[in-house]
């Protein structure tokens, strides 16, 4: 059913947007009826109100034009015209938050102000004269506490009634003097154009005064009128002694300061939460302690995820999957299903999807910790501390967390790039993440280093990790100047107060990611495992093979082997293992075991020594480290970078760089050994 | 130029090499990044251009706003600022575009 009433949820980042959205919808999402701007917007039905739908827009500080994606957010408001806007405002930093409010009011859409974190404000002895605020802003003001689920009902009712009565903000004049004159003169000039384009006149004229060229183009303002506009603005600038951008910002903030003087009454200086944040920051962003603490926290998260909780749950989970598999196995046996179908279901689907699903607990636990870090307000501090280091790579401090997650698993790491503010940063980080050696590659490293570098395993491992990091740094430097040239989005970052994360929001965030992963496991990975199983079980004549040596996969391996010959491992079994490694990196070891006919680890060790020398083994490891991590990662890249083409280009780059590095390792190494 | 005396010689040299681009020639104040932690100032003019400048203004870094440098990140950059009752971080390069009048501790 198409919703009859659309609510748009707009506000500053960290003002409680997602929390409020979750309270309104209970975390249920549905497919959007808004045009998708390609960035994290969420849409869901409002609980207990049939036909009412709410969309959460990405947090923003202003409707100014910074980059294309900010524009697309703005376009949702301008062109999709929601029935009512709920503007969520963090009452504890009301001045900065109201800046967006003033711009939203110009849109001519019914609007309700949700004053969030009112409980906190009240506890600190701050009183806000709500009636006066309503009167001054001419829009309904509802005090809420999103995290405590207070005032949400009133807010929804207020929003629905504002939409039904189509009460638009009456007051849109925040200015006086020369700015006022300029805005009004321009309003008259563009009125006709704005009506034709279906855009709010007032909003357009203030943006024109600010110097937003895009609005002029969108309104198709002819050039004689543009000259008049320029003249009006120059006149204003001359009288004010400042430029257009500063004049508008100044005008808005002057209005807000005056408004706050009338409505916000403070007893003492800083709030308890503010003081607490400063005390925590004294440690967490300390000159010397900041880095050790950061690494300690990340280490704890990894250790708990991969070694303690996640591993434990993973074991239980795979035990369950194994049990389920053997149960189905038994059923199929009893039902006398044909051998081929039986093998397909058990060896193909269950083994493949099952092995991927066994990562599920790890992903859930990792996202649990990351949600806590994110909701507590620690992430912006990490960006603050690490920014200097990452700037050399053309990135900002915010990229560090996804990159570190990459050492665990690329899939959640690439999913975590969503929190980055600009497209450029998101894509660049997503490309670098696969070079952070993920934990699924550890079985390969473990196998090869014990066989070929006994006693020196640690050095070989460190060498591999460093190779990965070096390649990612080189890639960043290369891309900085070419694919991702241009200016990064300015690093202007608000440090919100630390807060205790709400259990519900942590849970929902975790659930969202887990759901995405499950969906993927049963679509892309499901198909991929079937394909690989088919290739492995049938020969070119589509006869089922006894041993996989004769399979199509082996044929492909033999065909691909010459490609790897310059790298020192032209053996078809190595090539085949690399191909199956595309499904999951763990498959490399198991494939080698199957193809060499080795029943256990010690025979595999002997067989491996026949195929590889220590040098070619290291070249092989480098290749494993750098080439396409797995289908799941590739699919995540496709989704986050918006297209199959991007994913294919990225994987070609990965294969290319893997080949090149392994080639160098082998050829240079051969000169010395 | 009183501040030069307190500064690390290396930093000092950097500023002499690249003088702050003054958008408004009337600005005779010091760039924001020259304030040290704990020091306060009043913003007098905001330079820079394009998206950066718009963002600075949108975040409330408008003329006549009082601002304090809270701290500097472990690697000496970016800086943490306090204004309009909230904390904001800026890179030094960007902070340099803002001219402030120092008002002491």
Image (cartoon, coloured by chain):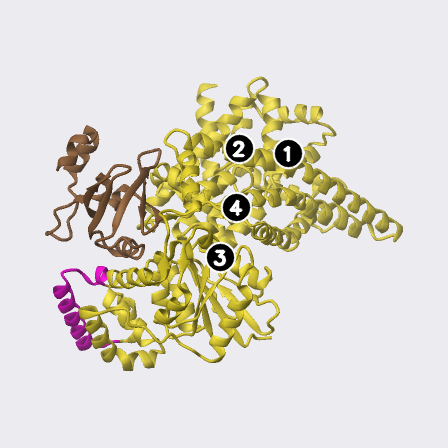
What shade does chain A have?
yellow
Which of the two marks, 2 or 4, is nearer to us in this view? Answer: 4
According to the picture, the residue beneath numbered tag 2 turns out to be: A299
Which residue carries the number 1 mark?
A308
Q: Where in the figure is residue B75, as x and y percent of width and height?
A: 33, 33
The Cα atoms of the two marked residues, 1 and 3, are separated by 36 Å
Q: Residue furthest right?
A: A334
Marked residue nearer the N-terminal end (1 or 3): 1
Q: Residue at x 34, y 78 (%)?
A: A197
Q: Categorize mark 3 by other alpha carbons within 10 Å: few (<14), some (14-19), many (20+).
A: few
Residue B102 at x, y = what percent?
A: 19, 43
Q: Nearer the viewer, mark 3 or mark 2?
A: 2
Instruction: Give A276 or A46, whichever is nearer the viewer.
Output: A276
* Label 4: few (<14), some (14–19) or many (≥20) C-alpha neighbours in 10 Å: few
Q: In this view, which residue lies farthest toward the left?
A: B26
Query: Callout 4: helix, strand or loop?
Result: loop
Q: Dot 1 surroundings within 10 Å: few (below 14), some, or many (20 or more)?
A: some
Identify residue for label 4: A500
Cα distance between the residues tagged 1 and 2: 12 Å
Chain identity for the colour brown used in the image: B
**Residue A88 in the image: above or below residue A187:** above
Q: Which residue is mark 3?
A: A643
Residues under labels 3 and 2: Cα distance?
Answer: 34 Å
Q: Which residues are magenta?
A: A221-247
Q: Are marks 3 and 4 in contact (CB under 8 Å)?
A: no
Q: CA distance from mark 2 to mark 4?
A: 21 Å
A43 versus A193 height, above or below? above
From the viewer's side, name the closer residue of A481 and A175.
Answer: A175
């Amino acid at each position: 059913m198409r919703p009859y009433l659309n609510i748009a949820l707009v506000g500053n980042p960290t003002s409680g947007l997602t929390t409020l959205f979750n309270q309104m919808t209970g975390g249920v999402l549905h497919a959007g009826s808004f045009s998708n701007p390609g960035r994290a917007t969420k849409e869901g039905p409002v609980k207990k109100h049939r036909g009412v739908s709410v969309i959460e827009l990405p947090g923003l500080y202003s409707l100014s034009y910074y980059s294309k994606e900010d524009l697309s957010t703005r376009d949702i408001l301008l062109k999709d015209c929601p029935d009512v806007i709920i503007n969520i405002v963090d009452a504890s930093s009301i001045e900065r938050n109201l800046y967006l409010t003033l711009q939203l009011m110009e849109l001519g859409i019914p609007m309700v102000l949700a004053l969030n974190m009112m409980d906190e404000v009240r506890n600190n002895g701050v009183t806000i004269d709500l009636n006066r605020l309503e009167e001054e802003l001419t829009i309904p003001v509802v005090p809420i506490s999103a995290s405590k689920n207070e005032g949400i009902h009133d807010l929804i009712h207020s929003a629905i009634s504002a939409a039904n009565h189509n009460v638009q903000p009456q007051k849109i004049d925040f200015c006086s003097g020369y700015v006022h004159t300029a805005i009004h003169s321009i309003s008259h000039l563009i009125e006709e154009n704005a009506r034709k384009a279906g855009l709010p006149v007032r909003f357009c004229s203030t943006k024109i005064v600010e110097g937003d060229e895009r609005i002029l183009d969108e309104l198709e303002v002819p050039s004689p009128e543009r000259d008049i506009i320029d003249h009006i603005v120059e006149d204003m600038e001359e009288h004010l002694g400042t430029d257009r951008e500063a004049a508008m910002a100044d005008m808005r903030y002057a209005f807000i300061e005056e408004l706050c003087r009338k409505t916000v009454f403070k007893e003492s200086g800083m709030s308890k939460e503010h003081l607490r944040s400063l005390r925590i920051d004294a440690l967490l962003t300390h000159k010397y302690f900041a880095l050790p603490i950061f690494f300690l926290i990340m280490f704890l998260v990894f250790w708990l995820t991969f070694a303690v909780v996640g591993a434990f749950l993973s074991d239980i989970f795979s035990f369950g999957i194994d049990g389920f598999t053997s149960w189905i196995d038994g059923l199929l046996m009893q039902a006398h299903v044909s051998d081929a179908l039986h093998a397909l279901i058990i060896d193909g689907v269950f083994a493949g999807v099952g092995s991927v699903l066994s990562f599920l607990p790890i992903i859930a636990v990792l996202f649990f910790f990351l949600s806590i870090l994110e909701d507590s307000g620690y992430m912006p501090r990490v960006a603050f501390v690490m920014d200097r280091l990452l700037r050399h790579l053309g990135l900002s401090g915010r990229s560090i967390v996804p990159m570190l997650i990459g050492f665990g698993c690329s899939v959640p790491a690439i999913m975590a790039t969503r929190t980055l503010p600009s497209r450029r940063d998101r894509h660049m980080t997503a490309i670098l993440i696969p070079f952070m050696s993920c934990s699924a590659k550890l079985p390969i490293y473990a196998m090869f280093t014990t066989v070929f570098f006994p006693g020196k395993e640690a050095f070989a491992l460190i060498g591999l990790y460093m190779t990965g990091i070096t390649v990612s740094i080189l890639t960043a430097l290369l891309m900085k100047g070419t694919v991702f040239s241009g200016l990064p989005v300015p690093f202007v970052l608000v440090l919100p107060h630390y807060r205790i994360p709400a259990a519900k929001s942590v849970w929902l965030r975790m659930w969202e990611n887990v759901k995405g992963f499950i969906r993927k496991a049963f679509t892309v990975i499901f198909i991929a495992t079937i394909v690989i199983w088919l290739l492995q079980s049938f020969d070119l004549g589509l006869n089922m093979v006894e041993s996989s040596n004769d399979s199509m996969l082996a044929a492909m391996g033999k065909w691909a082997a010459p490609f790897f010959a310059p790298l020192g491992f032209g053996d078809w079994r190595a090539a085949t293992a690399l191909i199956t490694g595309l499904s999951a990196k763990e498959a490399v070891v198991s494939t080698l075991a199957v193809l060499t006919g080795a029943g256990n680890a010690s025979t595999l060790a002997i067989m491996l020594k026949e195929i590889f020398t220590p040098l070619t083994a290291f070249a092989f490891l480098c290749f494993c480290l750098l080439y396409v991590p797995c289908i799941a990662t590739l699919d995540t890249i496709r989704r986050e970078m918006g297209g199959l083409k991007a994913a294919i280009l990225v994987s070609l780059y990965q294969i290319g760089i893997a080949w090149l590095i392994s080639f160098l390792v082998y050829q240079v190494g051969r000169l010395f050994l | 130029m009183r501040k030069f005396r307190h500064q690390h010689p290396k930093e000092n040299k950097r500023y002499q090499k690249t003088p702050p681009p003054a958008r408004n020639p009337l600005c005779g104040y010091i760039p924001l990044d020259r304030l040290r932690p704990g020091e306060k100032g009043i913003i007098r003019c905001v330079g820079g251009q394009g998206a950066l400048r718009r963002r600075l203004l949108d975040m409330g870094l408008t003329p006549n706003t009082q601002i304090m440098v809270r701290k500097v990140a472990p690697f000496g950059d970016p800086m943490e600022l306090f204004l309009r009752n909230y904390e904001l971080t800026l890179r030094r390069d960007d902070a340099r575009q803002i001219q402030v009048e120092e008002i002491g501790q």
